[in-house]
Amino acid sequence: MTGKIIKGVGGFYYVHLHNNFIYECKAKGVFRNRNIKPMIGDDVDIDIISEEDKTGNIISIHERTNSLIRPAVSNVSQAIIIFALSNPKPNYNLLDRFLIMMDRQNINTVICFNKSDLVSEDEAVCIKDIYSACGYEVIITSTNDEDNNGIDELKDKLMDKTTVLAGPSGVGKSSIVNAVCPHVEAKTGSISEKIKRGKHTTRHTELMCIGGDTYILDTPGFSSLYIENMEPEDLKLYYNEFEPYEGGCRFNGCVHINEPDCAVKNALSEGRISKLRYDNYIQLYDELKEKRKW
């Protein structure tokens, strides 16, 4: 039978089958011999040992479309990064870091700005327009108004995909998860019962099936991200809004900072590129340049 690994604990892998049951499985020794380790998100074939106890063995791992290191998960369709529009105010530099990390791994990212009930509509639209102009899909949400603004749009984005949900602490990520999939606790309860641990007392990565082929991975909140193994000169490639102006600068290899006759800086001065994004670019460039010295 075929299913998806949704959790791994202590050498056991919990495989969600299309019949909606979860089986506790061990990986066959052949994987160790080939230095292959199953990952959360892997699509696998299993032999069932006991239907009553819901146990089995993983006998094959399907080819992965991709795999992330942090968080450790495979076959990711997309990432949704959640920031609050207020309380706390968005850290746009942190947002850009996440976008760059996902872009480097060829993972499409949707930006969700939550708590729209705490700001004016004009402010929400202004922020949305900045990132929409850079080619990102942006969804504005609130779980604190009667209409649950944007939640249905978010649900549609999740459908039939494996999605990583990420964002800093305090942005309302848990409220969004509960609004999108209110019955998720019941769907993951059997694993917690098997391993005798509360779902909120473990740091193990866990995919949650919220129906059919729709899975979400709710990652812990974070307050910092570091961009690693990147040359400062390559950073500009991850700012999509610079692309229309490449080739318009006086110097080949222009990094759009101190060079004269720079098309990107001209676009900035004319308001065609967001100053907020450009300031983040400068900060990240300086950080990468400082790292290279060491």
Image: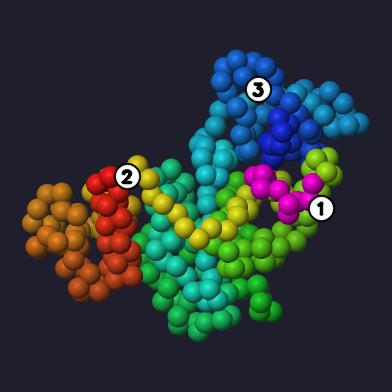
Task: Mark 1 or mark 3: name the one nearer the start of the chain.
Answer: 3
Amino acid marked by disc 3: Ser
Q: Position of residue 197 (x, y in %)?
A: 79, 46
Dot 1 surroundings within 10 Å: few (below 14), some, or many (20 or more)?
few
Gap in angstroms between the C-alphas marked 1 and 3 = 28 Å
Comparing 153 with 8, the one in front is 8
What amino acid is found at the position of numbered circle 1 in the picture? Answer: Ala
Rate crowding at label 2 as few (under 14), some (14 to 19) or many (20 or more) other CA atoms within 10 Å.
Answer: few
> Percent x, y for residue 163?
58, 50
Dot 2 amino acid type:
Met
Which residue is at 33% across, 52% downward? 238
**Prevailing secondary structure class for the magenta stretch in the rendered image:** loop
Q: Is residue 101 above or below residue 278?
A: above
**42 left or right, relative to 191:** left
Q: Which range is magenta?
A: 197-207
Q: Which mark is residue 230?
A: 2
Relative depth, front residue between 64 and 24: 24
- Residue 213, quarter of picture: top right
Q: Is residue 206 magenta?
A: yes
Q: Nearer the viewer, mark 2 or mark 3?
A: 2
The quadrant the N terminus occupies is top right
